[in-house]
Image (cartoon, grey):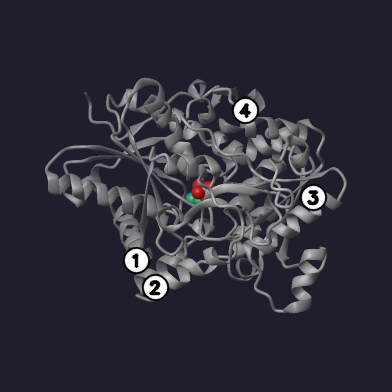
Amino acid sequence: MEKLKKFLLAEKEIPENWYNIQADMPNPTLPPLHPGTLQPVGPQDLAPLFPMELIKQEVSKERWIGIPEEVRDIYRMWRPSPLYRAYAFEKLLDTPAKIYYKYEGGSPAGSHKPNTAVPQAYYNMKEGVKRLTTETGAGQWGSALSFACNHFGIDLEIYMVKVSYDQKPYRKFMMNVWGAKVFSSPTNTTESGRKILAEDPNSPGSLGIAISEAVERAITAGNTKYSLGSVLNHVLMHQTVIGLESIKQFELAQDFPDVVIGCFGGGSNFAGISFPFLGLNFREGKKVRCIAAEPSSCPKLTKGQFRYDFGDTAGFTPLIPMYTLGHTFIPESIHAGGLRYHGAGALVSQLLKDKLIEAQDFHQLECFDAGIKFARTEGIIPAPESTHAIACAVKEALIAKEEGTPKTILFNLSGHGYFDMSAYDSYLSGKLVEHRLTEKELHADLNKLNTPLIP
Ligand SMILES: *Cc1c(COP(=O)(O)O)cnc(C)c1O
């Protein structure tokens, strides 16, 4: 076969269905609980926040869920995304392993996040919603949802964590270009925001506060709903277009991965690349290893507890069965802002509990080192989040070298890092320091939890 660098699918091969792993996983997830009554929450509890179609998808056990044509039409702008073979990177690592990467940075917002932002905006539009609210930290999710809402004529209000709003204005400008209103959170326009400002007028904000403001606004304003960029089952499912395309692209490559890797914030891009392969494990007896790569400074999967916890810092959401460091855990301000989340989605948590997936943690310096090596061989400058997947691929490739056995590695390159150049500058000028989490720091917030443990 001719030596090919990229494996491209035709537009008509954009998947027609999303893959719902709930149809195939051996043990279902436990239900989310109402924090007051500790009873399972029903669709009616979620109806003020989400459109009915997304609530249905959240609990569906159907294996395949059709992607609306209107959504596929927007996916056409950047999907199918390319699968690349990393020849130069392999050579630098001097490994017998073959390394492939699926590149999601070619979307308008520069990451995998539009894969779910587009259907979420679409279903809201179909159900007559006029305005969405959301929160954003570093701005990846806010920019993806701005792009999607602009397309379907929905107003979008974004509560952006104040420190990022002040320090990273470029993502905010992007949101403005796509017509979104961006507020520096905490604001004085919501009850939750005013309460924080009364205590500390100079509060730098946090993702938890921003969620509280966005949710409050969605509940109190007319014709308004709320949208979340990770963690929830339907969000993870929308991302499976990544893995479904990859399976077809490996047919073109006449190859198949032994190991599939995704970096891990709340679980959406990891699920996107790995769930379709796990489906093959479940249905066809394949033995693909799927590894979630998380930051050592926020190690919920490798060092957290599997128990019920809140999805947000303020404790507004239902209790979710998940691996968590405690909802009040505030990680070090590493540059991979998208991975600074205290918990993990319920689906991914159950799969880890059942030992059907693996998790590994990586330190920031090791990740930037891998990211720079990748940029110098493959050209693309990866998002700081994505460098965690690259560091994991390097580790697996070096194990293959040590053992002298070939293996095929696939990782998801979840986004580009062109808005994160100051992080690369810090690394290259030696200003980036390693933060080692102590046992005490690790357990402090878990010890404070009084939410139900799961036996
Ligand atoms: C948001 C983000 C992540 C982390 O979120 P997940 O839901 O875990 O995928 C990873 N990579 C990039 C580029 C992101 O923007």
Residue shown at the point (32%, 51%) measured from the top left: 392
Neighbor class of circle 2 (other Cα within 10 Å; few <14, some 14-19, many 20+) is some
| Marks 2 & 4, CB-CB < 8 Å contact | no
Q: Secondary structure at mark 2?
A: loop
Q: Earlier in the sequence, mark 4 or mark 3?
A: 4
Residue of label 1: 365
Q: CA distance from mark 3 to mark 1?
A: 39 Å
Residue 76: image x %, image y %?
56, 30
* Residue type at numbered disc 3: Ala
Q: Earlier in the sequence, mark 3 or mark 1?
A: 3
Disc 2 versus disc 4: nearer the observer? 4
Q: CA distance from mark 2 to mark 4?
A: 44 Å
Residue of label 2: 432
Is 140 or 175 nearer to us in this picture? 140
Q: Secondary structure at mark 3?
A: helix
Residue shown at the point (38%, 74%) measured from the top left: 433
Ligand 1 near label 4 (Cβ, under 8 Å)? no
Residue of label 3: 218
Residue 224 picture quarter: top right
Q: Secondary structure at mark 4?
A: loop
Residue of label 4: 60
Q: Is residue 49 above or below residue 278?
A: below
* Residue type at numbered disc 4: Ser
Q: CA distance from mark 3 to mark 2?
A: 39 Å
